[in-house]
Each structure stands twice: as structure tokens, then as C-alpha cells.
Amino acid sequence: MKKALINKFYKTPMTGEDVEERSMQIIDRRIPLHDFAPDEWQIVRRMIHTTADFSLMGDIKFTPGAIEAGINALREGRPIFTDSNMIRAGLSITRLQAVNPEYSADKIVCC
């Protein structure tokens, strides 16, 4: 009789970082070739990881300068808008504060 996979996780628990790393490896194995630039691919990987939806790839387009504009907005401490409290809860204030110390939970708005 095969044991449930959960038993393996109880014996060898994984940290959040371990889960994230393993997930990214799975994504990279499943999609070894793509047309995204390296900086774009980091964003696409994160979107796939967050949603577990590989079909997103066909719908994602980057406007020239969009990534740089996003980085600048984070450095300036601009508010972050999301449509889900789950996404809001998953954003790391500590990581955001490494980019701009003025970030707080109040700067993440769920619409």
C-alpha cells in the first residue's frame, strides 16, 4: 500500500524558501524554451508560480520600459494595488522595505 505524500512532508518538512525554489525548478523544467527576455522571464515565472497556471504565458506581453517603470515605482515607495487579499498578504513588507524603508501594509491596497 502506497503512503500518502503528506507523510513524506511530515518527515522532511520544507521551508517556504525550499518550496519556492522547487516550484521554480519545476517551472523551468516544464518550460525550458520561451521568447521572454531574462528580466521578463523572472516576472512570468513568478506569475506562473503564484497562479499555477502555465497557460498564462500566451497572454503576457511586456510594453517597452514597463519593468523599469515598475522598479522605479517600488524605489519611490508608490502604493501597490492588487485585486486579492491573498496576494496582499503574500507580499513581504521586509522585502519591500529593503527597496524603500517607507513601505508598510498601508501602502498595499486591495481593490
Image (spheres, rainbow, N blue to C red):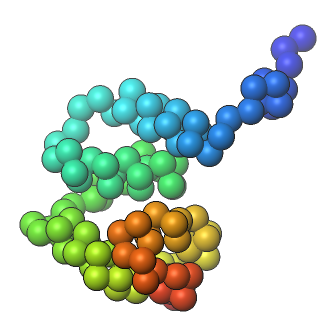
Quadrant housing residue 32: top left
Q: Nearer the viewer, residue 43 or 3?
A: 43
Residue depicted at 41% across the width and 66% down the height: 98
Above or below: residue 38 compared with residue 81: above
Above or below: residue 5 compared with residue 43: above
Q: Count of labels shown?
A: 0
Q: Residue furthest top?
A: 1
Residue depicted at 44% across the width and 38% down the height: 24
Q: Is residue 44 left or right of residue 40?
A: right
Q: Nearer the viewer, residue 39 or 28?
A: 39
x, y percent for residue 40: 23, 53
Query: Quadrant of the image for the N terminus?
Result: top right
x, y percent for residue 55: 39, 49
x, y percent for residue 100: 37, 75
Quadrant housing residue 31: top left
Asked whether the viewer can see residue 30, the reply is no
Above or below: residue 70 compared with residue 81: above
Residue depicted at 84% across the width and 14% down the height: 2
Q: Nearer the viewer, residue 10 or 45?
A: 10
Above or below: residue 87 compared with residue 15: below
Q: Residue furthest left?
A: 64
Asked whether the viewer can see residue 47, the reply is yes
Q: Residue furthest right?
A: 1
x, y percent for residue 66: 18, 70
